[in-house]
Each structure stands twice: as C-alpha cells, then as structure tokens.
Image (cartoon, rainbow, N blue to C red):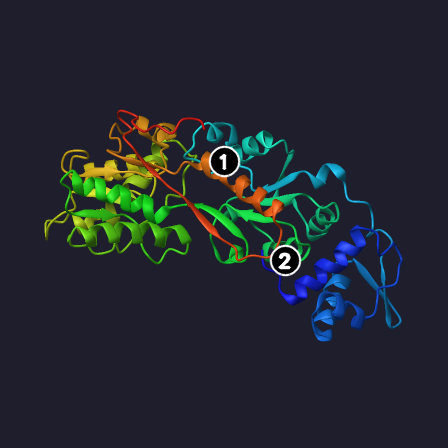
Amino acid sequence: MILSPKQQVIAAVNQWVDECSLPPDGQLPSENYIADTVNVARGTVRSGLEQLIQEGVLVKRGRKLFVVKNSAASPSPLLRRTIVMIGVPDPDEALRVRNTGYLAAVQAGAISAAAQAGMPSLYLDFSRLTVADVKDICRNRPAGVLFFHSSLIPGDFPRMLEIFRSNGIPMVSSEDNAHFASIDRVESDQFGGAKLLTEELIRRGRKRILIFLRSDRPEPWVAKRIGGYRAAMKEAGLVLPKEPEVAPFIEEYGIWTREAYHRQVRFFAGCLLEYFDGSGEEPDTILARTDWDVPVIAGALRLLKREPGKDVWLAGYDNKYSSCRWNEFEPATPVLTVGKRNSVRGRKMVERLLERIADPRPAEPVCRLEESILIDPANQTNKEGAE
C-alpha cells in the first residue's frame, strides 16, 4: 500500500503515539523536525497535523500541539495479531455460508484461512461502526483489515477507509471499485466467468445468445460480465442481439410467494416481448443475471408461448439455483451456471493480507482475480462443494 506524503506524516505521528515515544499530554516536535524526519515539505506536515487534530489524536494549546491524554493507550497484544473483517451481515447467513455461490461464503473462507494461519478474526458490522470506532480500532493496531462486498456498505465509508490507510494498517478488499483503488483486491473474475459460459454455449451450437442485462447499470460487475459475453460472441463471429430496452433487477427476492412470483413473471414477459414478437430471429439462449432469475424468465417465456429448455435455453450465474424457492412454481433449470468459488476467494484475501503484513514496505496495490468454473445443475458436475 503506497502512502501519500500527508499519509506518511499521519502514520509517523500515530506510530510515535502508539509506541509511547510521544507520551500522553506530551508536546509534539516542531514542524521542521517532523518534515526532516519524514522527508516531506512543511506544508504537508501542517496538513497532516490538522487531520490528526480533527481525529482527536492531537490538541492545540495556544500555538503548540500536544498528544491528547487518552491517545497513547497501549495497543492490545490480542488485536495486534487479529484480522479485523468488516462487512454487512446477511440475514440468511447460515444458509448462504453453506453455498459457495453466496457472498457470505467469502467471509467463511477468510475466517477458515485466518484460523489455519493461527490468527484470531473479529467480524464487525460496518453499518454499526462510527468514525470514533474506527479510530479506536486503529489505536489498538490490528494485524490487518479485510473488507467484504463493499457495494453493500453504507455510511461514511471513504472517511473510515482513509483513517485505516493513514494509520498504515494493511488492507484487502473483496471487490474492485473506486473506493478500493489504492489497496489490494481479490475479486471474482466476472469477465472471465461470462466469457467461459458463453464460449461453452457456442460450442454446444447456440448462436443467438442474449444476455439479459443492460450496460448502463452502475454496478461494476455488470460491465465486466457484459464484456466477457461480448468478447466470446465477437471471437465466434456471431451477431450481438440488441441490448434490452429494459432489463429488470428483481426486487422481491425473499418474498417467496406465488403472487410475488407471478408479478415478476409478467414484468419480465413485458421486457422480453420485443425479442419474441415474430418480427425477427429470436434468441435461442438467454443468459440470466443470476440463477434466481431463471424460474422467472422461464415463466415469462411460457407467457410468450415459448418452451424454456427447448425453444430457448436458459443459463444462470452464481451456482445457487437450488436455494431459490420460486423454483417450486417453475420446473425449468439452467442448462449451465457459473460457480465463483467465493470461499476460495476469501482464503486468498487472507493470503494476500499475510503477504502485506510480512512485507509492509510501500508497493503498488494489486487486484487478483479468482477464476470461475462451469457447473451443470442437472448433474452437478464440477461442483464446488462447501470449501
């Protein structure tokens, strides 16, 4: 992790406080001394010290700065060897941990890897953390921090991430997005997974493959998934169907009623009508956003007088079809789905964090991709298992 000059100032002062070379209520050295020690400009020192005042580490008395009395508490020996894991708990976590298609499996893999490395782990619900909590965590100097599915994390996240960074805490994220560009990431290869799936369908004779996603969705994985699909189609010399005018995201997951299912089916049928109105070549395959969309798309096809699995193949994603309770209303299953090996990804996050802990010297952040695998739900070939 590379620190900016300002972050180097903040990290140096925090280290002096933590090591008690700056005692509680002790006066801070001059700006010139800090600038020479850290090898930065005086203006940079002044900016870093202003942030430490805002964070409650330093206090100004007249024209001089002092360490606040409660800032030099000895770091916890337990926390120094603990990996802090931050995310948003899933209400169905017990179910999801057992299926490696769910995001909770990333945490499960990370907890397992930390235990194998002989390191305690502490899981924290980000929605309940405050800036003061994050400062307190940093004062206790954990070994490192892992962030899980940051797209779900609410609140003042950039500010909290900056506090961890300025304290020199090693960090790894499970997602690659703008927030995490400055730290290491280990994410699922969404581009590669979609390309692998599309290539296999083409190998099986499919030619008019429609991905039921719109490229203007803001989620970073959407562009990657569409990119992999388009790359496979282009390499095969196949024509891309026009992008859907509307490609809905289901909002009623968890409301597993027949009424909710049929509402979604009717909505999806309206969105798919432009492809099945008899005016041109129809798709022979639809790539669903996730396995849970498959029974809804199948029901929509039936409303449009098409037989799923015969007239139109359906392919899923995430390897979690068996846990969709809407499949009791629709027997069609995906011909193929993609397993993201989420528990393996969690273990690799810990591996990368341990590398950073062992060698904390500044280095360019890296993004490592976990390969996806194809799964046949009917035969459960290449089944991931509870890794």
| Mark toward the start of the polypeptide (2 vs 1) | 1
Q: Position of residue 246 (x, y in %)?
A: 29, 53
Q: Distance between the residues labelled 2 and 1?
A: 25 Å
Q: Is mark 1 on a helix, strand or loop?
A: helix
Judge by depth and name the residue closer to the eye, 81 or 240: 81
Name the amino acid, label 2: Glu
Q: In which quadrant of the rendered image does the N terminus lie?
A: bottom right
Name which quarter of the figure residue 243 lies in. Answer: bottom left
Name which quarter of the figure residue 122 lies in. Answer: top right
Q: Where is residue 303 in the image (x, y as percent from the top left)?
A: 20, 39
Instruction: Give the label on residue 219, or none.
Output: none
Q: What element carries label 2?
A: helix
Q: Which residue is drawn at 49% across and 58% down?
A: 178
Q: Where is residue 357 in the image (x, y as percent from the top left)?
A: 62, 45
Q: Name the residue under label 1.
A: 104
Judge by depth and name the residue closer to the eye, 298 or 163: 163
User: Which callout, 2 or 1, points to the residue nearer the camera?
Assistant: 2
**Left or right: 43 with respect to 315?**
right
Name which quarter of the figure residue 319 lies in. Answer: top left
Name the amino acid, label 1: Ala
Q: Mark 2 points at which residue?
A: 162
Q: Where is residue 216 in the image (x, y as percent from the top left)?
A: 35, 58
Asked whether residue 126 appears in the rendered view, the answer is: no
Asked whether residue 26 appears in the rendered view, the answer is: yes
Q: Could you tell me how many numbered marks the image carries?
A: 2
Q: Which residue is drawn at 26% across and 48% down?
A: 211
Q: In which quadrant of the rendered image does the C terminus lie?
A: top left
- Image: 272 above or below 330: below
Judge by depth and name the residue closer to the eye, 93 or 201: 201
